[in-house]
Image: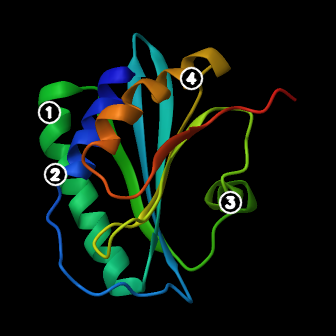
Amino acid sequence: MLAVVIALGFAWQHRPRENTAPVAVSNPVYAETRMTVDASGTLIEGVMLGETMDDADCQKQLKIIESEMNEMGSRVCPTCKIQTSVCKSELLPRYAKLFDNEPTHLTYLSLAKGSPDEREYRLIYWGLTVQQSEQLCKIVPGMQKRRVGAVKCVHASSV
């Protein structure tokens, strides 16, 4: 599980970067990449969500994520498989609240946009215990070194 998270973080931080002026996102299109990990017979589903500027930007972000995940996955996590990658104009309510950094029943990562080439991203894994989801927090310092925007854990609610 931790290898998957580290691979995803590495891939995200080493994607090609653009140098454009900051643009406010008025009508975001959301990139959604779902992946599965077979962790010793337990199937874990990961969802990476990104807030992009428009459909073209979304398609570009999906290609970057898929390319990096496929490249890294074969070396770091052979049981990691991308299931779907789609662009959506709206998110399910349970995912929309992630962009407000609202706690859920599991801990997830929040990657804020801090420069024009960065995008808002959220990463959550389903099929874990609360304690297992807390392991995501271990990679925050390494991810933060490569990002301008704040990277933080949104800890699970105690409800």
- Mark 1 or 3, nearer chain start: 1
Residue that label 4 marks: 134
Numbered badge on residue 74? 1
Closer to the camera: disc 1 or disc 4?
4
Residue type marked 3: Asp
Q: Amino acid at mark 4?
A: Glu
Tag on residue 14?
A: 2
Nearer-the-camera pick, 68 or 134 = 134
Q: Which mark is residue 27?
A: none
The type of residue carrying mark 2 is His
Crowd class of label 4 (few under 14; some 14 to 19; many from 20; radius 10 Å): some
Determine whether label 4 and label 2 are within 8 Å by CB: no
Q: Which callout, 4 or 3, points at the residue further toward the start of the chain?
A: 3
Quadrant housing residue 18: bottom left
Quarter of the picture holding the N terminus: top left
Earlier residue among tags 1 and 4: 1
Q: As displayed, is residue 144 above or below residue 157? A: below
Residue 78 spot, x, y in % from top left: 21, 26
Q: CA distance from mark 2 to mark 3?
A: 26 Å
The disc placed on residue 100 is 3
